[in-house]
Amino acid sequence: MSDTVEIEGKLFVPAEAAEIAKWPSVVSEHPQPTLTLKDDDLFLITDTIGNIAGLLTDERQGSMGLFCHDTRFLSRLELQIEAHAPILLSSNARKGFAMSVLCANPRIGDRIRAETIGIQRDIILNGGLFEELKVTNYNTQPVKFQLTLSFGADFVDLFEIRGFSREARGQLLRQDQPDNNGSHNGNGAGEHGDNPEEPMQEEENPGRSVNSSHQMNRPEELILAYKGLDGSVMESRIKFVHRQPDYLDGYTGVWNLEIDSHETQVFGYRLQLLTDSRPTNAGDKPGSLVQAKASVLMEEEEWRNAATRIRTNNKAINQAIEQAEQDIYLLRQSWGKGKALSAGIPWFSTLFGRDSIIAASQTLILDPAIARSTLEILAEYQGKTWDEWRDEQPGKILHEIRLGEMARCNEVPHTPYYGTVDATPLWLMLYAEYYAWTHDRDTLDRLWENAIAAMEWIDREMESSGYLTYACKSNRGLANQGWKDSSDCIVDRDGKLADAPIALCEVQAYVYGAKQRLSELARLKKRLDLAERWEEEARNLKNRFNRDFWVSDLDFCALALDGQGKPVDGIASNPGHCLNLGIFTPEKAQSVAERLLAPDLFSGWGIRTLSRLSPAYNPMGYHTGSVWPHDNALIALGLRSQGCIDQALEVTQSILDMTIMQPYQRPPELFCGYDRSEGNEPVQYPVACSPQAWASGSIFQFIHIMANLVPDAPGNYLRIIDPALPEGIDSLSMQNLRVGSTLLDLEFERSGTTTACRVTKKRGNLRVVIEA
């Protein structure tokens, strides 16, 4: 057969040549809450019972599955008892890499009463997917019933799930099995023939019948496979452990159980992801669920011991901090020898420029090693050539990289894609900020040429207009290339969309900050020519910016300048990003700070992305009225820098209040911009990523805002300037805080309107200056 594919001695044929009956799915008509697990470059999304239903139609259900490298390696994982969904008792995925579910049986005819059979599901991600099921009979007599696990893998590219169209797809494969005569029939492993016996269950249950030949053939392995358009063969290889299925019905494992009163039976499986017969995912490959759990707990403990431990006297806030620590740990993803934070689950589980950089900056207070790896990994992918398809130019920092079939086949330009205007100046800012925290001269020197190339890219792009602008060149690229990158968000006061090339206000502030900070490093490198040039360019940019971006009748900063150099005068949150970087004159900075807290922008839960007075305002809009935690954290940082301490703490408190009302006390990527009123809760954005790196990272930025730390590791000192805790937090401790080579323990305590700080432990010779 010409289309036959051989994988390690096993023959596979196209799926349409080997049609097999599919075990019926049990699907609720209503959207199901989901649970998320993450391990390095793997993530899993199931419903709260641990299932991935076989019909993925609803938007939330459509994101379910086991994913790696932008490919869904498992699109069905469905536990049924006598062809019914189990009854959920409880489920928990707080650890992030492990899920524990307790469920029970529905009524099974007149034979078994409801909720007398307990089922415990334990699922762990670590180098693969592991599941163990413990089934216990709580009846007073033995019971017989059928339990099934149905698997499926569509190997769909994540871009397809997000709505991108494809002209063609690769080929799903089925294992070619010899029949009793030795010829190949194309049927799946263990599939029953045409002479089934009577079903075990009563007629009211739609389960499958049992073939006696399958009672003798207990398969240990099931392989789901796909050959991509690029020729890559991907597999989900499932190996059953403990008790094997009595038989396989297509891709459904069937267990005919007989369990004595109060007896527990155990079974499970391990799923490996392979591409061209090699492991698809990074990391260790433990052999069992017990080994997987031990391995990930050991790695997590090692990371936590090296990270800063931050706690308060407020239990709810501590839960948010602990969850943020957990999420930052989970979102670290391998790229070569280093790890950077992937942006978020499910849509952005990959390396981003802007997102990874901002999250690394937010978490310098927690783990500076994240920033170092992020800088190094992004430097490795720094633009080297001129490529309009990928919006690449020499010196530019990438926007996003993808590894799925559509990227490999150049159906999308993300190999990597460089359509971001802000990642390059943000990389330079992180480069300087990391050095201030660590005094890591080796990394500074190693990446110096990358910094020069990044600044040269900025300067080339600013030549024509004096500002850093963007205009998409790729026919599958992003029209908007700042952090607000949806198509409808850059609007003037009348709600009209701006024309490219667009100069965003916050991007100019990033350039200003980068030039100022790099000028200091240039002096350190004895490049006085660069230091003086960048200082002068920063001064000139500040003068132009305050002239061209200011909208006098609104007494506010324009969101952007359009392609004709005219202000895009929509009232938006973007100018808040400028406050911390010093690009505004003092008077203009004060005006921006006051305007951001006006009721049309500040909802009570946070600052909206767009004023509710705008014709384009939509509280459910992605960037046109929603509230983003990271946006608010950057604004609060700016308010703090302007001496607006009460306002900074008000924004901080609003996002923390929102966070502690979320499942697992985890801040989402964004939420809707409806007003806060007594008795109401924040309104969820339906498809927000959770966890999201810069949302979880914002928790640490808010802590930084309270403590107001100003590190200068090269100068061997740390300034703590006028610390301030919000109401609801009376004390804050930091243990194992790393500044340069010194480790510090700090205690903050609030009394009335003042907050005191003291150093309780110091390992190193860093000077700590506390300024009230």
Image: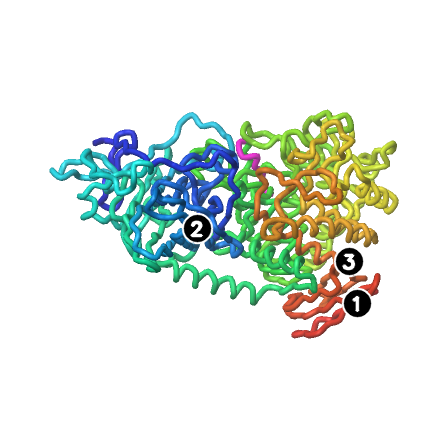
Q: Which of labels 1 and 2 is toward the front?
A: 2
The residues colored magenta run 389-395
What is the distance, in whole Å, between disc 1 and disc 2 at their CAs?
A: 50 Å
Residue under label 1 = 756
Q: Residue 287 carries which label?
A: none
What is the distance, in whole Å, between disc 3 and disc 2 at their CAs?
A: 41 Å
Residue nearest the observer in this picture, 257 or 700: 257
SS category of the residue bearing label 1: strand
| First of labels 3, 2 by sequence position | 2
- Name the residue at 31% across, 46% down: 146
Percent x, y for residue 92? 51, 53
- Name the residue at 54% across, 35% down: 390
Magenta stretch holds residue 769 = no
| First of labels 3, 1 by sequence position | 3
Residue at the extreme left: 181
- Name the residue at 83% across, 53% down: 643
Left or right for 454, reference 175: right
